[in-house]
Image (cartoon, rainbow, N blue to C red):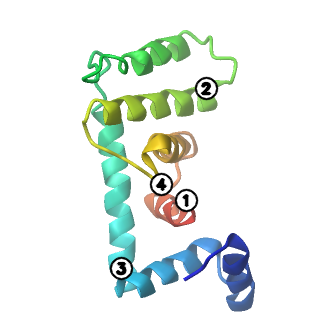
Amino acid sequence: MYSSIAEILAQCAADKKAFWEVVMEADMESRNVGKEASREAMRRMLAVMRDADQSYEGDRKSASGLSGGDGKLLERYNQAGKNLCGDFLGKVMERAIKMSESNACMKRIVAAPTAGSCGVIPAVLLSYAEYSGAPEEELVNALYVA
């Protein structure tokens, strides 16, 4: 296993492999699985992220009543063309808020890598896929990097 990014980068240079490949191999070793099992686990995580994104309910509130509805408001704001950050970053922010609210409402919990950043990785990857047309395998590779 690796204890720093520098160690992973050194392995990348030594093996002439991409960062995601070195991380995937570490995953395979630590879980004692083959390449396809490792990649399938990442595909499942990506599917969960997509499902959580698509199942957002803008009218739902958390049990405390403190969370919910802001993703829907941000979506309307973005649709009105008011977001100074532009379409892409606006969509990333919208998705991150929606994912966070869904987690707070005890829907599908997507805690990657922690609950505090629950919406960030799915928001970036799903928005990137939407805007770039990136194939699923590229997103799977990005999950290894994340």
Q: Position of residue 88 (x, y in %)?
A: 61, 32
Question: Which residue in the protein does label 2 denote?
Answer: 87
Question: Which residue in the protein does label 1 denote?
Answer: 146
| Farthest residue, direction front | 64
Report if the CB atoms under discs 4 and 1 are less than 8 Å apart. yes
Q: Secondary structure at mark 1?
A: loop
Q: Secondary structure at mark 2?
A: helix
Foreground mark, 4 or 2, reads 4
Q: Which mark is residue 113?
A: 4
Q: CA distance from mark 3 to mark 4?
A: 22 Å
Quadrant for the C terminus in the image:
bottom right
Q: Secondary structure at mark 4?
A: loop
Q: Judge from the rendering whether residue 47 lies leftward or rightward of residue 73; answer left or right.
A: left
Q: Relative to 24, say whether 11 is above or below.
A: below
Earlier residue among tags 3 and 4: 3
Residue at 47% in and 54% down:
113
User: In the rendered structure, which amino acid carries the disc numbered 2?
Assistant: Asp
Which quadrant of the figure has residue 132? top right
Q: Residues within 10 Å of mark 2 (few under 14, many from 20)?
A: some
Q: CA distance from mark 4 to mark 1?
A: 8 Å
Q: Which mark is residue 36?
A: 3
Q: Judge from the rendering whether residue 86 lies leftward or rightward of residue 59; answer left or right.
A: right
Residue at 53% in and 12% down:
77
Q: CA distance from mark 4 to mark 2?
A: 26 Å
Q: Secondary structure at mark 3?
A: helix
Report if the CB atoms under discs 3 and 2 are less than 8 Å apart. no
